Image (cartoon, helix red, strand yellow):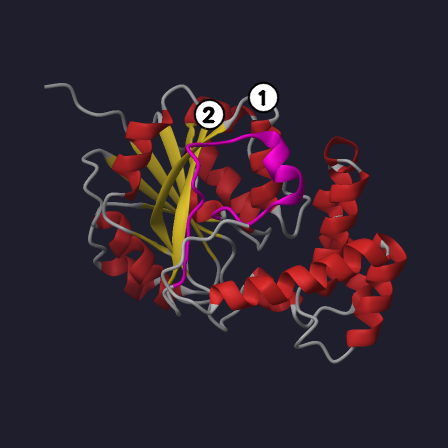
Amino acid sequence: MNTPKLVSVVIATHNRAERLTLAIASVAAQDYPNIELLVVDDGSTEDYSEVLRDPPMPLRYIKLPENRGACAARNKGIQEAKGHWIAFLDDDDQWVPDKLSRQVAAIGGAELCLCGYRVIENGHVHVLPLNQIGAPRLYRYNRICGTSGVLGRADALKREGFDENLICSQDWDLFLRYALRQPLCYVPEPLCLFSDGGHERISNQAKALPITQIERRLRAVEKHRAVIGESCYRSKVAATALAYIGTRENKWEALRFSLQRAGWFASLGYLFGRSRRRGSASRPGKLAEE
């Protein structure tokens, strides 16, 4: 009997030793029989010795000498990976036990395979009724699965990994670059358990960002402006500026930024759409199609 092709799992971590324990356990629980695990520490100051003392499966621990960001850590994992496939898991997320086996079975000749997810904190399921995701869908739409839902061909990822210049939307940037070559494979099941809690995450940090730093968060959108077109560009600018309008102290400043950069149509369209999405997300178990 032939041994299934090796899957390299890359977990990028930074100062979240306690959460990493659950992420590693979910990799160890996979029913896919041939996995190597690489934990890439992005210059943490926390002590990881307890987590790594007796892990539930063999792993390679790689510590970067300084904090360079999650994309740099993922790219280091890509460079070190020995597998035919590479999958990524954020240190605060988890997988269901058949996540890897389902994606390996589905990916076929595609370079990337994505999947649906379930939010750990509230049970909300987000699944698209699709088997493929083409580039046009990504022009406006970004809620797919994040990096924890990605399985990709190692040779493709070693040629073209994550853009280390981006501080957010790195997953969308990766998906779009690959989808412009060929459609992405998608498994319409919640195989990833996504954490949306109040701990330190890029999206939570964005809630407190001053408007002057919003420009930095638009780098991915600016990068692909010519590809996605002006209408989609304006929609994404509005979404970036207004994403946390409900919790911002400087609500009017954020709205003014959006109106100036995205215009009235895109800004009001995002706010009305946000109200509809909040209503949908309040119903756990609903399959999400937006």
Q: Specify whether residue 221 is in view.
A: yes
Furthest residue in direction right, as rendered: 260
Does residue 105 appear left or right of residue 200 in this picture?
Answer: left
**Circle 1 sits on which residue?**
181
Residue 147 spot, x, y in % from top left: 48, 46
Q: Nearer the viewer, residue 145 or 19?
A: 145
Asked whether 186 falls inside the magenta stretch, the response is no
Q: Are marks 1 and 2 in contact (CB under 8 Å)?
A: yes
Residue 217 spot, x, y in % from top left: 72, 54
Q: Nearer the viewer, residue 152 or 80?
A: 152
**Circle 2 sits on which residue?**
111
Q: How far, Cα to Cα, is label 1 from label 2?
A: 9 Å
Q: Nearer the viewer, residue 59 or 178?
A: 178
Q: Specify whether residue 62 is in view.
A: no
Which stretch did the figure color magenta? 124-145
- 45 is higher (above) or lower (below) than 111: below
Classify mark 1: helix, strand or loop. Answer: loop
Mark 2: amino acid: Glu
Question: Label 2: how many residues lie within 10 Å, few (<14), some (14-19) or many (20+)?
Answer: many
* Residue drawn 27% across the image and 48% down it: 27
Question: Label 1: how many residues lie within 10 Å, few (<14), some (14-19) or many (20+)?
Answer: few
Asked whether 126 falls inside the magenta stretch, the response is yes
Q: Nearer the viewer, residue 76 or 10?
A: 10
Q: State which tag comes first along the sequence, 1 or 2.
A: 2
Does residue 32 appear left or right of residue 108 in this picture?
Answer: left
Residue 278 spot, x, y in % from top left: 55, 67
Furthest residue in direction bottom, as rendered: 249
